[in-house]
Every structure is written in C-alpha cells, then in structure tokens.
C-alpha cells in the first residue's frame, strides 16, 4: 500500500507494551498495561480501511462483483450458487489473513426474476 516502514513501526509502538497509571487526588495508582480493543483506538477506522483496501486489491476479480463501504461488503452474482461461491471465497480469503467475518449480520437481496 506504499506505507513507509517507519510509519508502520510508529503505529505498532502505540499498540505494543503501552502502560499507564491513574492519577487521583489520593495519588497515582500502580502502573498497568493498556489493552486497547481494536475498536477502541482513534486510529482503528484508518487502519481498518487500509487493511480492507489491501485485501480488496489482492482479491478483486472485476467490478462490480465486490463493493466495499466502511466495514460492509456487497457481493453481486447472477445466480444464488455463484453468490454463495463468491461469498465463501471472500470469507475464506479474508479469514486466512486474520479478518473476522460475522455471518450473523449477512443479508441476501434477490433482484429480478427468481426461481424461488
């Protein structure tokens, strides 16, 4: 994606081994490790877009078969079998690279003539 190694290292340092303490009127607490959830960081939206864009460039066959918007994916196919095949290919592809897919949020829209 053209991101310089120094910038990758800088971002990684934000997430690796961060420690803090809590300052109160009674003094500071003992130091503890900061465990930021991946959705809890201000950098998360940008990092997510960069990762999804990189995955999309590697996977994409031809538009408009896959359309990305924020953390949503639209898979377009001419038949139900093709849709299932493309969705499974996409899911396998991203999950093999560490991205989790929530199938409970999956919706299917059928447009035009359908045999079912």
Image (cartoon, rainbow, N blue to C red):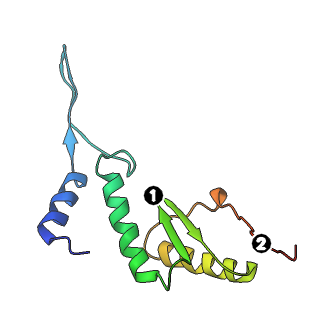
Image point 54% across, 77% down: which residue?
64
Q: Which residue is mark 1?
A: 70
Name the one closer to the observer, 110 or 31: 110
Q: Is residue 64 above or below residue 27?
A: below
Question: Residue 31 sits in which quadrant?
Answer: top left
Name the one closer to the observer, 41 or 2: 2
Crowd band around label 1 with a 10 angstrom C-alpha radius: few (<14), some (14–19), many (20+): few
SS for tag 1?
loop
CA gap, disc 1 and disc 2: 27 Å
Residue sitting farthest toward the right:
116
Q: Provide residue 91's location: percent of width, then percent of height.
A: 56, 73
Q: Which residue is mark 2?
A: 112
Name the one closer to the observer, 41 or 17: 41
Image point 36% across, 62% down: which residue?
49
Q: Provide residue 63's location: percent of width, then percent of height.
A: 50, 80
Q: Is residue 17 left or right of residue 64?
A: left
Q: Quadrant of the C terminus?
A: bottom right
Image point 15% across, 64% down: which residue?
7
Crowd band around label 2 with a 10 angstrom C-alpha radius: few (<14), some (14–19), many (20+): few
Residue sitting farthest toward the bottom:
61
Name the one closer to the observer, 69 or 84: 69
SS for tag 2?
loop
Q: Provide residue 72's location: percent of width, then percent of height.
A: 52, 60
Q: Which numbered dot is residue 103?
A: none
Q: Earlier in the sequence, mark 1 or mark 2?
A: 1
Image point 36% across, 53% down: which residue?
45
Q: Is residue 86 left or right of residue 66?
A: right
């Amino acid at each position: 994606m053209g991101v310089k190694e120094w910038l990758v290292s800088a971002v990684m340092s934000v997430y690796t081994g961060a420690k803090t303490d809590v300052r109160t009127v009674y003094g500071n607490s003992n130091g503890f490790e900061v465990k930021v959830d991946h959705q809890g960081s201000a950098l998360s939206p940008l990092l997510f877009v960069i990762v999804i864009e990189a995955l999309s460039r590697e996977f994409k066959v031809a538009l408009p078969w896959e359309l990305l918007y924020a953390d949503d994916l639209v898979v377009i196919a001419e038949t139900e079998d093709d849709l299932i095949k493309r969705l499974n290919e996409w899911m396998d592809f991203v999950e093999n690279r560490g991205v989790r897919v929530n199938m409970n949020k999956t919706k299917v829209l059928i447009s035009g003539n359908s045999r079912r």
